[in-house]
Image: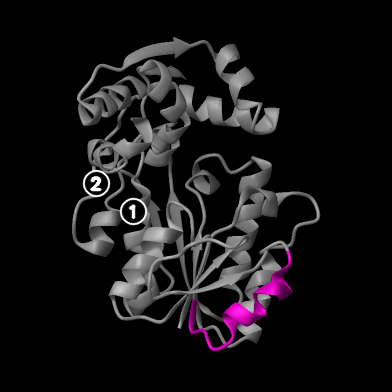
């Protein structure tokens, strides 16, 4: 059996579906009661309380570990999840980390994630670490304004990074959970090319079949909007990446192709598949 945490999200849901279709027994874990793909067992557990995972982990051979942001806050102990998994007999963990642990290693959340990577390496378990950059699904932040006004409002309209389709992260995770060849692998996951916010707006417009206007926000305007849903420090950190990506953050990685045998999907494909969110 394979346990998938974050199973109702942009990565966990397609991963659960892919594993079920591969004939695996899957336990889908989420914090609240929710629908999960047919064929998966659903267990409610809170990763902030690692002991609550015990019913999900019983009899499991592998775990996909995706942490929400609050598990990096003061007092959180995500390393205890690894201990619980090992105590339950789990042999393999695939950890969703972040590219930022190598490109911007000094931020508090990235220091915590690197520490968790180190804990996993020292656990004695089989492990794989996935380090994605920006997600195509972050474009869903624009869904309301596109639906209401056909407008995408974002800073740094002509500065891009190679964002990745979360379904590609799920495909890589599935391969790493199922194939011993990926044990002790560390994979950097990006999309196929650099794409700017303005170009993303154009792709959304093409998917809709109607014009979408791009409105460039100032950095201050963007920060004011972002701090409604995240700490100011994290907003500043995110804006620094979006406005001044480093060479490492602009690099297109070959690792999706290396693991799943095909190129990563372009943003336009993600926009077409998720067009209902923007209608």
- Does the magenta-highlighted stretch encompass residue 50? yes
Asked if residue 81 lies left or right of residue 251, the reply is right
In this picture the colour scheme is one colour
- Does the magenta-highlighted stretch encompass residue 151? no
Q: Secondary structure at mark 1?
A: helix
Q: Residue at x 68, y 43 (%)?
A: 108
Image mark for residue 268: none
Q: Is residue 51 above or below residue 236?
A: below
The residue at the far right in this view is: 75
Q: Which residue is mark 1?
A: 167
Asked if residue 142 lies left or right of residue 122, the reply is left
Q: Give coordinates of residue 175: x percent, y percent.
A: 32, 69
Span colored in magenta: 49-62
Quarter of the rendering containing residue 87: bottom right
Quadrant occupied by the N terminus: bottom left
Q: Which residue is mark 2?
A: 265
Do tag 2 and tag 1 residues touch (Cβ < 8 Å)?
yes
Q: Is residue 38 above or below residue 207?
A: below
Q: Residue at x 47, y 22 (%)?
A: 243
N-term mark: 2 or 1: 1
Q: Is residue 8 visible?
A: yes
Q: Is residue 158 above or below residue 91?
A: above
């Amino acid at each position: 059996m394979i346990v998938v945490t974050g199973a109702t999200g942009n990565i966990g849901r397609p991963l659960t579906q892919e594993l079920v279709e591969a004939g695996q027994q899957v336990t889908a874990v989420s914090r609240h009661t929710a629908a999960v793909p047919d064929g998966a067992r659903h267990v409610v557990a809170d990763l902030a309380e690692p002991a609550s995972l015990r019913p999900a982990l019983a009899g499991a051979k592998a775990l996909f570990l995706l942490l929400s942001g609050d598990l990096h806050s003061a007092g959180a102990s995500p390393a205890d999840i690894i201990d619980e998994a090992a105590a339950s007999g789990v042999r393999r963990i695939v950890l969703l980390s972040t590219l930022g642990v190598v490109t911007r290693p000094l931020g508090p959340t990235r220091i915590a994630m690197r520490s968790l990577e180190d804990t996993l390496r020292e656990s004695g378990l089989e492990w794989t670490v996935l380090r994605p950059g920006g997600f195509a699904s972050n474009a869903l932040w624009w869904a309301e304004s596109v639906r209401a006004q056909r407008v995408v409002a974002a800073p740094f309209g002509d500065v891009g990074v190679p964002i990745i389709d979360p379904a590609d992260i799920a495909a890589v995770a599935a391969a790493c959970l199922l194939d011993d060849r990926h044990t002790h692998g560390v994979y950097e996951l990006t999309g196929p090319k650099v794409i700017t916010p303005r170009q993303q707006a154009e792709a959304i417009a093409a998917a809709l079949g109607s014009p979408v206007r791009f409105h460039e926000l100032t950095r201050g305007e963007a920060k004011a909007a972002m701090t409604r849903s995240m700490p100011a420090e994290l907003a500043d950190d995110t804006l620094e990446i979006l406005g001044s990506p480093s060479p490492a953050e602009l690099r297109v990685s070959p690792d999706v192709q290396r693991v799943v045998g095909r190129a990563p999907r372009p943003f336009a494909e993600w926009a077409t598949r998720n067009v209902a969110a923007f209608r």
